[in-house]
Amino acid sequence: MADSYVFPTVRSSRSREAGVIPPRFSRFVFGGVFGLATLVAVLFTMGGGPRLPLLIVATFWGVLGIVSAIFNAIDRVPDALSSLLANVGLMRHPPGFSQIEALVAQGHYEAAAESYRMRARREAERVEATVRRAWLLAGPLGAAAQAVAELKALREPGDLSPAEDVRVGLALADLQDDRRESSGEALKELRRLLDRYPDSPYAREVRMRLEHLRRDHFPEASA
């Protein structure tokens, strides 16, 4: 970052040392000369002379205006591009969970669970991170009761979207189904989702889970 601020100053000082005329001074001289030429052409035409000099000067100023506008636009392109890239950087989506998944693959389950807990502090990631943490807690960390409690706590405020509510509800049902003594709770959870979202895009998935649960644990009811 330091180079980006120092470089313009060094470049301008070297230009002065080399005897290069500053661009602003050149434009001033150039404008003064052609401004004087324009005045002479106007006076010459008003004095009864031919209009050709005035037309030439007018054409020149028109062309100069177009060229100046083009170069000004070109000069602004780097700044506009830099601003765009900066905004894209500021709006960049948070990275995925690949680093945490790498911890899981290496067997660092506690570190991964803690990382998921930290990521759950982000509003946009709280549901997915909490569900993934719950699977770690219920699986390799052997804390299924804590996993269920955290999922229920996530849903308790009642501010989840339908998609988030279904995501959490299905995770709860799966965890409770894995705990054989809680199969009834899993069935209750799936029924809650189906009653709440009967015509939603998620209803088919919920019905499939419900059917599988009944077939596995309550065969007499599904017969």
Image (cartoon, rainbow, N blue to C red):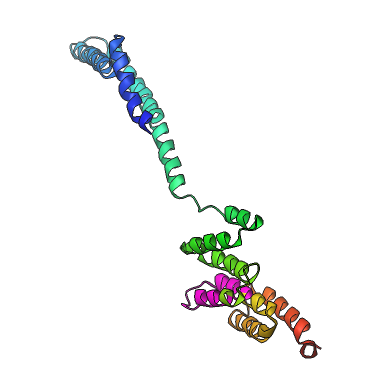
Left or right of 10 on screen, residue 142: right
- Most prominent secondary structure in the magenta stretch? helix
Instruction: Identify which residue, 71 or 201, lies in the foreground.
Output: 201
Tell me which residue sits at (33%, 17%) in the image. 60
Q: Position of residue 33 (x, y in %)?
A: 24, 12
Residue 22 vertical position relative to residue 130 in the rendered view, above or below:
above
Verify whether residue 181 appears in magenta: no
Q: Is residue 213 visible?
A: yes
User: Looking at this rendering, what residue extends furthest in the right direction?
Assistant: 223
Which image quadrant for residue 147? bottom right
Please indicate, yes or no, whether residue 58 appears anywhere in the rendered image. Answer: no
* Residue 163 x %, y %: 57, 70
Locate the C terminus and report the quarter of the image it occupies: bottom right
Residue at image position (62%, 82%) is 189
Left or right side of 112 for 70: left
Residue visible at 39% across and 30% down in the picture: 73
Q: Is residue 23 left or right of residue 182?
A: left
Where in the figure is residue 175, as x and y percent of width and height? 65, 75
Quarter holding residue 215: bottom right
Q: Image quadrant for the N terminus?
A: top left
Q: Which residues are magenta?
A: 148-171
Between 39 and 98, the one lying in front of the other is 98
Residue 129 vs residue 136, the one in the foreground: 136
Check residue 170 for magenta coloring: yes
Above-or-below relation of 86 to 183: above
Residue that appears at 40% across and 40% down = 83
Residue 173 is situated, as x and y percent measured from the top left of the image, at 64, 78
